[in-house]
Image (cartoon, grey):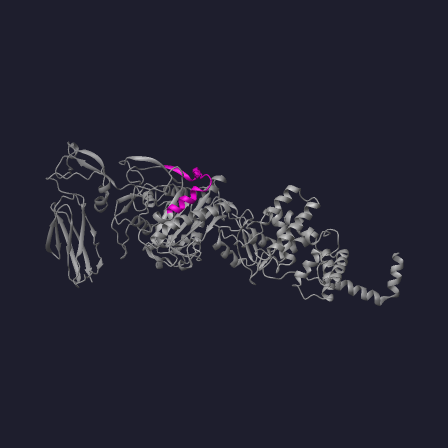
């Protein structure tokens, strides 16, 4: 046989050429890409469930191609359109002959003989005008399609591109629009209804020609019963199901996330890391608090939840369900806003890491002016001195500014670069010391990322036998298929060591609200959460960020247009949302202490500085590094008389007959405020009358400071206001005499405060107390 064919081809070379050309044309006749129509951007949760979509560029709801067809719909569509689908090579000559015969007898088209494969080709050729030539092309392409693709793939092409009425294309969209369900959730009746729609989608679809649609559906259901697809009971129940009426809206569980993904993956199907159940809970929580916030004319809020271990985004609430008037479409996850106090923990960690701070160290909290900048605490009060960890927990501004100045503004600003906070992109000089109080801007995405990275540093250190990953500080992940690459392990830290981060989180567990109130109605103390609030200047931005071993939750609340509102703070507006979100998260574990990063050391029990021989001391764990902390300077040995009633010195007593005692002494200004809230604070005893006082002044100016340049304000009548002079004295009851430019002005007792109206120019202000102590400052009135 082969020999005869060879002889034939040798005798007829032209026929061989023609045959070869036809084969080549046949092979290349089918385009590589059948469907070029734009598709919608489809966003799914981690369980592959639709959470939102954007319509295709041509205005059609057309999803990207599916990778499987549900059994019920597959059975229905094959029995309705092409019962011999798995047997034919792309066309069915028997069906075509029957269709031609039926249509000729009727004088009109009553029956079609196209297979599903042919219908795929017709859809790909965009339903060109019917003709014999077009029919031949479809037949050729159909057979070629059968050679290129499996039956499964052909069915997927049909299911993804078949019209289902209106602007609905493909089964996946149709099941959502007509039933509000995923395709695999459809019942037999629902699957049968959708299976008959592509046959004449412009004539019958939900809400139109219901009687005809019902007849077609029921006819298909009866056929399925007759061939034994299901039993009679299932058939009878299916007949009772109603037809769909008004189309359902597609899910909008995370609309702002969908818009964000559509910018990068337009027309694609993206399966995200979003936990659908958590996302719905977060939406519900935000909606609940929105109803509360809008009573104060606060209309917007955003929530982000990250998994610390995987860095995957678990919930993404970009805004409240407000109206367009209040900018509901603004994505607040990526909006840069004033940080308030939420980066204070980064400074605290940096100083612990540098060996320049210990948690129990006293930090001054007194009226402060630095190069013309006068920071104020949120509660406009002062505590005199406060431990560093309490200053962080209470979010005190003055200690934070003083610590930043001590640590170095430039150094801290450079370290912030490591966190890649997009909004903080200017120099240290631009921000100044306000950097730590909200002078810079950042967003929920970057801040949550930063805290997740810190938490992960501690976890990895404990999990890897005291090592660090080189790529610890990485961006959050939105796609389910992606995994973070932490890089290689090293003994070298990235930016901050695990011990310093752990101590920061320990401080952030404190329950004191920033305003200093003792009550906190939202926090469940049984749950260990490191959290920080922040409020920007003018009450425009309210922040709350919480961290556990497993999760980071970030909240921003405010108005998208930047309008501030009274009583709108991180504690009152954002923190309630934060803790409600934590309540719906799984069990919250606390960090294991990174023991290899700690050493024990003795510190002063009163001041928190390194202990001296005269300090009452205690042992604490501190990060194992070069320690730059000074020894306690607040404890001093003083000489007391035999009754411990007065201080004495060599000018009035034989020191061999005196009692030496260690005394905790704060500088006058710190002492002035500290003793108001520390009733156990003991002021130094007075010297005996015969004793000459030491050179240490018991007085210190609160305001103004030496060298201040001051502009006096004017009242409504145009007259200049007073300059208020304030003084702290270690013994308030001591009379103090005030002089301006050598001229006596007034005597004060107990409350050392006077008002004057000085002329413009330089002035010298002198105070002398009844014991002869003197203090002098110079100011310039402009």
Q: Position of residue 741 (x, y in %)?
A: 13, 57
The image shows a total of numbered marks equal to 0
Q: Nearer the viewer, residue 568 or 82?
A: 82
Q: Nearer the viewer, residue 415 or 600?
A: 415
Q: Any magenta on residue 576? A: yes
Q: Position of residue 46 (x, y in %)?
A: 54, 47
Residue interval drawn in magenta: 575-600
Q: Is residue 480 left or right of residue 594?
A: right
Q: Any magenta on residue 106? A: no
Q: Is residue 379 left or right of residue 507?
A: left
The residue that appears at 70% across and 65% down in the rendered structure is: 130
Q: Nearer the viewer, residue 147 or 653?
A: 147
Q: Position of residue 230 (x, y in %)?
A: 67, 43
Q: Name the quarter where the C terminus is drawn.
A: bottom left
* Image quarter of residue 167: bottom right
Q: Name the quarter where the N terminus is drawn.
A: bottom right
The residue that appears at 14% across and 45% down in the rendered structure is: 750
The answer to whether one can see residue 344 in this image is no
The residue that appears at 30% across and 46% down in the rendered structure is: 515
Which residue of the protein is positioned furthest toward the bottom in this rendering?
Answer: 14
The answer to whether one can see residue 687 in this image is yes
* Image quarter of residue 548: top left
Q: Is residue 272 left or right of residue 389?
A: right
């Amino acid at each position: 046989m082969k020999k005869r064919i060879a002889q034939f081809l040798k005798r007829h070379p032209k026929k061989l050429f023609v045959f070869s050309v036809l084969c080549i044309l046949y092979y290349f006749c089918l385009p590589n890409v059948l469907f070029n129509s734009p598709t919608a951007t489809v966003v799914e949760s981690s369980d592959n469930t639709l959470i939102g979509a954007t319509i295709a560029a041509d205005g059609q709801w057309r999803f990207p191609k599916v990778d499987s067809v549900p059994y019920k719909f597959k059975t229905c569509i094959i029995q309705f359109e092409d019962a011999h689908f798995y047997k034919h090579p792309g066309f069915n000559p028997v069906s075509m002959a029957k269709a031609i015969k039926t249509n000729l007898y009727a004088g009109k088209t009553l029956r079609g003989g196209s297979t599903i494969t042919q219908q795929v080709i017709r859809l790909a050729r965009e339903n060109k005008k019917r003709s014999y030539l077009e029919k031949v092309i479809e037949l050729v392409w159909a057979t070629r399609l059968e050679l290129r693709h499996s039956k499964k793939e052909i069915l997927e092409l049909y299911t993804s591109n078949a019209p289902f009425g209106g602007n609905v294309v493909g089964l996946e969209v149709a099941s959502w629009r007509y039933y509000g369900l995923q395709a695999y959730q459809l019942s037999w009746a629902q699957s049968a209804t959708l299976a008959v729609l592509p046959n004449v989608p412009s004539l019958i679809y939900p809400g139109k020609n219901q009687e005809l649609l019902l007849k077609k559906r029921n006819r298909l259901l009866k056929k399925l019963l007759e061939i034994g697809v299901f039993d009679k009971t299932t058939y009878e129940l299916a007949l009772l199901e109603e037809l769909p009426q008004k189309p359902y809206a597609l899910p909008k569980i995370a609309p702002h996330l969908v818009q964000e993904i559509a910018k990068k993956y337009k027309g694609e199907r993206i399966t995200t890391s979003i936990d659908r159940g958590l996302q719905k809970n977060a939406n519900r929580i935000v909606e609940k608090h929105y109803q509360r916030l809008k009573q104060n004319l606060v209309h917007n809020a955003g929530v982000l939840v990250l998994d610390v271990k995987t860095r995957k985004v678990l919930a993404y609430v970009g805004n409240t369900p407000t109206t367009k008037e209040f900018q509901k479409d603004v994505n607040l996850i990526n909006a840069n806003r004033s940080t308030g106090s939420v980066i204070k923990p980064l400074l605290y960690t940096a100083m612990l890491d540098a060996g320049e701070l210990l948690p129990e160290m006293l930090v001054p909290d007194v009226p402060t002016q630095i190069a013309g900048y006068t920071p104020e605490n949120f509660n406009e009060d002062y505590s005199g001195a406060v431990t560093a960890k309490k200053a962080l927990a209470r979010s005190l501004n003055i200690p934070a500014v003083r610590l930043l100045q001590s640590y170095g503004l430039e150094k801290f600003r450079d370290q912030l670069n490591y966190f890649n906070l997009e909004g903080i992109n200017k120099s240290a000089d631009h921000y100044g010391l306000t950097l730590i109080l909200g002078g810079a801007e950042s967003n929920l995405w970057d801040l949550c990322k930063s805290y997740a990275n810190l938490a992960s540093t501690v976890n990895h250190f404990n999990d890897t036998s005291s090592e660090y990953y080189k790529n610890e500080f990485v961006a959050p992940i939105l796609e389910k298929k992606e995994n973070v690459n932490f890089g290689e392990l090293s003994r070298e830290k990235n930016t901050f060591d695990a011990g310093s981060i752990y101590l920061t989180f320990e401080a952030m567990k404190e329950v004191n609200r920033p305003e200093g109130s003792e009550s906190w109605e939202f926090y469940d103390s049984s749950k260990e959460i490191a959290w920080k609030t922040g409020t920007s200047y003018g009450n425009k931005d309210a922040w709350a960020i919480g961290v556990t071993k497993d999760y980071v939750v970030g909240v921003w609340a405010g108005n998208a247009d930047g309008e501030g509102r009274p009583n709108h703070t991180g504690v009152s507006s954002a923190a309630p949302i934060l803790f409600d979100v934590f309540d719906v998260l799984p069990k919250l574990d606390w960090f294991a202490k990174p023991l290899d990063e700690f050493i024990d050391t003795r510190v002063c029990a009163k001041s928190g500085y390194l202990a001296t021989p005269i300090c009452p001391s205690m042992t604490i764990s501190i990060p194992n590094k070069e320690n730059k902390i000074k020894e306690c300077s607040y404890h001093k040995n003083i000489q007391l008389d035999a009754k411990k009633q007065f201080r004495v010195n060599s000018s009035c007593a034989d020191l061999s007959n005196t009692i030496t005692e260690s005394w905790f002494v704060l500088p006058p200004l710190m002492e002035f405020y500290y003793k108001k809230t520390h009733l156990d604070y003991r002021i130094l005893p007075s010297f005996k009358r015969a004793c000459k006082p030491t050179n240490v002044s018991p007085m210190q100016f609160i305001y103004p400071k030496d060298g201040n340049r001051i502009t006096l304000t004017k009242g409504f009548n145009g007259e200049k206001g007073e300059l208020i002079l304030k003084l702290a004295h270690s013994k308030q009851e001591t009379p103090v005499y005030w002089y301006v430019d050598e001229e006596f002005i007034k005597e004060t007792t107990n409350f050392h405060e006077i008002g004057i109206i000085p002329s413009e120019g330089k002035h010298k202000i002198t105070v002398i107390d009844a014991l002869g102590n003197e203090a002098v400052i110079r100011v310039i009135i402009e």
